[in-house]
Image: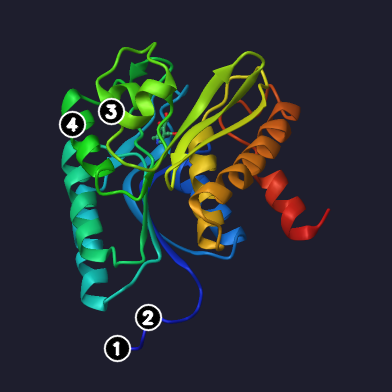
Amino acid sequence: MKPVNGSGMKRAALINDLSCFGKCSLSVALPILSAYGVEAVSLPTAILSTHTGGFEGYVVRDMTDEMRAFSAHWKRMGLKFDLISTGFFSSPEQLEIAADFIHDFAAEETIVLVDPVLGDNGSLYGCFSEACVEKMRALCALADVISPNHTEACLLTGSAMDTCVETLLPLLPCPNAVITGVRRGAEIGYEARLDGERVSVYKAYVPIQLHGTGDVFASAYAAEILNGHGLVDALPRAAEFLDACIYDTAKRQPAHWYGLAFEDELKRRTHNS
Ligand code: PXL
């Protein structure tokens, strides 16, 4: 077999769903990582006609069997990854497959980023059970860094939904954690513990309801890390990227309600316009 490693380009495995319309998960991760010069390899957990946030009658195809078969093929190929990221899962079983994937493919230098997609706005998404929360906790323990929103941080730590970030951070099942979407007056931001440092980053809050912000942030954060930035340094850089996408999305309201218009910022960055 011809060699598949050693091209000099960073390679990321993206374990996430493909929501074909709407902007989240692989639909945002693939273009963002590519624009940052990273080779992105998808391991789809499910293929959906749209994401689940605001569409009626969406169609879902579960990819559990394919996840096993694809990763077995990659194992036979000896494929190597510089980063493994995980996002949305469509069954508790898939969380175990992701854990096996990390055991099989994460080398000493591989960064494992778990975005523990479980819920938002104070509740667990309807498609998940307590079993998913439990397995997500175990997956987070295998990660180098996790990026829960406030709701997910509460679910992972078994805390009440009004628990403050200062209490949550040391309880999370991974030493490096970025809690996203934290409100502070007229601002919104990130409260993190990274490489032993306590880090806060805030931006002005733009009052529109947005889908997929966590996915855009996690993609940019992974991309910044793979471009040589440490966990601390990558945070404000990814926050800057997301912030630009939010302003572009606000300009496109009400039509662009279903996700972030991340393409505008990618175009500016890649075409200097
Ligand atoms: O953005 C998280 C996410 C990922 N994948 C699917 C979703 C959501 C959030 O609603 O529906 C399918």
Question: Mark 4: few, some, or many residues within 10 Å (few <14, many ≥20)?
Answer: some
Residue type beneath disc 2: Val
Residue 110 in which image quadrant: bottom left
Q: Which quadrant would the N terminus be assigned to in this image?
A: bottom left
> Would residue 67 be found to the left or right of residue 58 on screen?
left
Q: Position of residue 242 (x, y in %)?
A: 62, 39
Tag 1, which secondary structure? loop
Residue type beneath disc 1: Met
Task: Return the disc, 3 or 2, that comes first in the chain's sequence.
Answer: 2
Q: How is the image coloured?
A: rainbow
Residue type beneath disc 4: Glu
Label placed on residue 272? none
Task: Return the disc, 1 or 3, that comes first in the chain's sequence.
Answer: 1
Q: Which residue is mark 1?
A: 1
Which is closer to the viewer, label 1 or label 2?
A: 2
Q: Position of residue 239 (x, y in %)?
A: 61, 39
Question: Mark 1: few, some, or many residues within 10 Å (few <14, many ≥20)?
Answer: few
Q: Is residue 144 above or below residue 125?
A: below
Tag 3, which secondary structure? helix
Which is closer to the viewer, label 4 or label 1?
A: 4
Q: Which residue is mark 3?
A: 156
Question: Mark 3: few, some, or many residues within 10 Å (few <14, many ≥20)?
Answer: many
Spatial CA distance of label 1 from label 3 is: 43 Å
> Would residue 190 be found to the left or right of residue 3 on screen?
right
- The quadrant where ligand 1 appears is top left
Spatial CA distance of label 2 from label 4 is: 36 Å
